Amino acid sequence: MEGAPTVMTYPPSEYQHWHARHAATAPPAGQQGSARIPQPLWEPPRTRTPGSAGDGGPDIDPGDGRQPWWPTPSKHGLEPPPAYAVAQPSGVRDGADVGYGVGSSEVFAPTVVSSSRSAWDDALPDLRNKVVNRLVSMNWNQTVTSWGRRRRDPLGPHVLVFFFAEPPSGFPATCELRVAARLFPAGDEPRLPMLLYELGPLFKDHLTARRDPDEVLFSWSDRRSPAARYAGLGVTSLDTPDGSWEQVQKTAQSDMDVPGRCYAHLVDGSMILIDRLARQEFAQTRIWSSHAVRDVSGVRQRHATTAADIATSDAHGAENPAVWQWLTALNAVLAEGLHHV
């Protein structure tokens, strides 16, 4: 029934998640808080060492009915937000609805709020590099997983990625990146702009109700400390301007023939677009960023082309402006809401 919550089984039925597409309501009484966060399907196996919580031990559900042992903001509280500024959609006042009202026609362009420079600001170029590397890795692993499951329990073409940054440390300042992700079944909304648009009111209701994001927003999550801050939102997708995931499956001979695209919008207003090309295009990776991307920690750095018009250019596909419009709006909802969970 349209508007009613449904249970998504992914993978086997013991992992239950309220699907983001459906009604922005809490799970029925007695079921909220019972969802378990599965091990990412495209992460290497990890096992739990007793007594390892909090000391760098593994970060997956113990599988014995207990709560996951990684700290979450909703369970441990939040300190004041970091010094970097949160970009708001153009023309949106503090506390105003970010484009989800009936009849809204606001076009969202990032507006960076000025702030005094801090260690967070100094760490952001390096954090962007970590975001790039993580998205490229996730997109390829999404390809392998989706290709293997295309004829049994298929997945949708999009994965929503939530970025969190641990407090900056060292000199030059760097932040460790943590991510969470939400997956979607194959029967869900296939158009990325519409999917992002539909998620806005749902996420806003969940966060306004102070529900635990690890239980109602994420399918799985890296372990993160109580001090970790929400740093932005991204998407890894198997839809590209050259063809949709549905179309590619009809012609590809293997997962190597499947291209991918990634988007990232960080809280300082920076935008990153990544195209991972297929084998016939020599498996190249092309990156565009509105802000500087650099590495200071020895992590692999891929060359990024500076492009200030990422969100508006039709050169990146006909749907590109619409994707950025609603990714920006959803990022603003999360940046505001996760400060108060």
Image: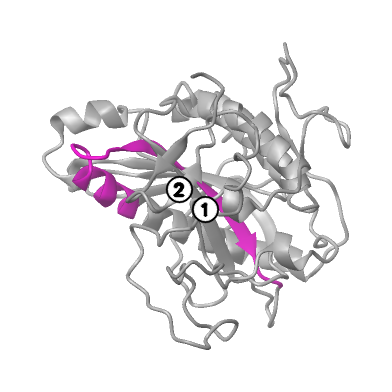
Q: Position of residue 210 (x, y in %)?
A: 75, 48
SS for dot 2 = strand
Query: Is 322 in the magenta?
Result: no
Question: As rendered, which of 331 and 262 lies closer to the eye?
Answer: 331
Disc 1 and disc 2 in contact, CB within 8 angstroms:
yes
Q: Quadrant of residue 230?
A: bottom right
Residue 133 sits in quarter: bottom left
Residue 331 percent coordinates (x, y) = 67, 41
* Mark positioned earlier in the residue sequence (1 or 2): 2
Number of marks in picture: 2
Q: Residues within 10 Å of mark 1 (few under 14, many from 20)?
A: some
Which element is circle 1 on? Answer: loop
Residue 87: in sight, yes or no?
A: no
Which amino acid lies under the numbered mark 2 shown in the image of this protein? Answer: Gln
Horizontally, residue 279 falls left or right of residue 155, namely: left
Residues 154 and 123: in front is 154
Cα distance between the residues tagged 1 and 2? 5 Å
Residue type marked 1: Ala
Task: List the residue tagged with mark 1.
Answer: 35
Residue in the picture at 66% in, 64% down: 72
* Residue at (16, 28) in percent of width and height: 250
Decide whether residue 151 is among the magenta residues.
yes
Which residue is the extreme one toward the front? Answer: 30
The correct choice, above or below, for 234 with respect to 126 in the image is above
Magenta residue span: 140-167
| Residue 58 sits above or below residue 207 on the image | below
Query: Label 2, on which residue?
Result: 16
Tell which residue pokes out farthest to the top in this image: 103
